[in-house]
């Protein structure tokens, strides 16, 4: 993949792209979860870059896109739009994993004409009606609670909580390694407490697919995904044998689900 950067007034954002000239190629943007980076989609890049144009990126304040001033999901969506303009890509399929679901949905709200479809991978919906006052109270306290946990314990528990396979566990530990504990806590704060500041109601006119790990016990993600599917009528498919990092735990099924979604878009 070609490694490139863009620069805004807030900092540098890094992304990686591989292009395909296949007659039915789609442009797929994969957006990773909190405290992770673009490597979270190794198994998807390997699979989809054979036939499609694939973009992975380190969202602002993550991976190599650090430091970054004034992080927000709105700014992240603007950075992604700048990437697409530079690459002269006008239509994309968005795949947002966990935290990555938020800049993906924000992009879809701001630039709906550029979105062919959205795959919500172990993430939760934009919408004011999903999150109770109790939910909001706990979301605001994720960062301060994390700061009380010893560094080594925090890293190990985070990697263990999201994974069911050694591959996912090891990769999460590797992605956490370059981060200081303060950076980890800061990123968790913007993923949870920060989300509440930007959350609003959204309606999408393009196809949406929700994927959820069979053993995803992260917060109330399972409950939110089922509520989202029921309210909007979006299909929800369970990824067998997977926890929160389902595209690492069971990449074969996740890749098949994405493949089928792309095929439906073609038809």
Image: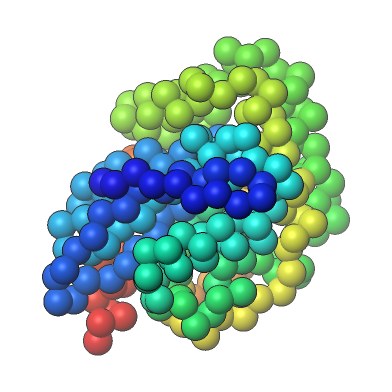
Image check: 111 left or right of 245? Answer: right
Tell me if residue 202 comes above or below residue 67 in the rendering.
below
Can residue 31 be seen here?
yes
User: Looking at the rendering, in which quadrant would you find the C terminus?
Assistant: bottom left
Q: Which x, y percent locates residue 221?
A: 59, 52
The quadrant holding residue 91 is bottom left
Q: Residue at 16% across / 68% down in the picture?
A: 21
Image check: 57 left or right of 106? Answer: left
Q: Which x, y percent locates residue 33?
A: 52, 45
Tell me if residue 242 comes above or below residue 146 in the rendering.
below
Q: Which x, y percent locates residue 240?
A: 33, 50
Q: Residue at 40% across / 55% down in the picture?
A: 30
Q: Residue at 80% across / 37% down in the picture?
A: 141
Tell me if residue 60 comes above or below residue 238 in the rendering.
above
Question: Which residue is at the front of the view, 197 or 219?
Answer: 197
Image check: 233 left or right of 150? Answer: left
Can residue 122 be seen here?
no
Question: How many numbered circles are shown?
Answer: 0
Question: Which residue is at the front of the view, 51 or 123?
Answer: 51
């Amino acid at each position: 993949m070609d490694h490139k950067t863009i620069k805004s007034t807030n900092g540098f954002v890094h992304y990686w792209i591989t292009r395909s000239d296949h007659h039915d190629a789609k442009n797929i943007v994969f957006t990773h979860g909190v405290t992770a980076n673009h490597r979270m989609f190794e198994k998807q890049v390997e699979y989809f870059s054979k036939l499609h144009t694939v973009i992975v990126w380190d969202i602002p304040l993550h991976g190599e896109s650090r430091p970054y001033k004034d992080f927000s999901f709105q700014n992240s969506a603007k950075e992604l739009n700048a990437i697409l303009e530079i690459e002269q890509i006008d239509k994309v399929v968005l795949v947002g994993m966990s935290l990555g679901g938020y800049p993906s949905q924000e992009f879809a709200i701001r630039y709906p004409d550029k979105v062919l479809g959205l795959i919500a991978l172990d993430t939760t919906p934009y919408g004011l009606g999903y999150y109770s006052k109790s939910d909001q109270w706990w979301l605001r306290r994720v960062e301060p609670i994390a700061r009380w946990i010893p560094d080594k314990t925090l890293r190990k528990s985070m990697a263990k909580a999201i994974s069911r396979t050694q591959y996912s566990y090891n990769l999460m530990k590797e992605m956490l390694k370059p981060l200081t504990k303060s950076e980890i806590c800061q990123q968790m704060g913007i993923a949870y407490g920060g989300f509440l500041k930007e959350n609003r109601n959204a309606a999408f006119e393009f196809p949406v697919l929700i994927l959820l790990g069979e053993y995803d016990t992260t917060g109330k993600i399972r409950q939110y995904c089922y509520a989202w599917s029921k309210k909007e009528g979006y299909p929800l498919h369970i990824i067998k044998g997977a926890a929160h990092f389902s595209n690492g735990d069971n990449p074969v099924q996740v890749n098949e689900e994405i493949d089928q979604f792309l095929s439906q878009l073609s038809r």
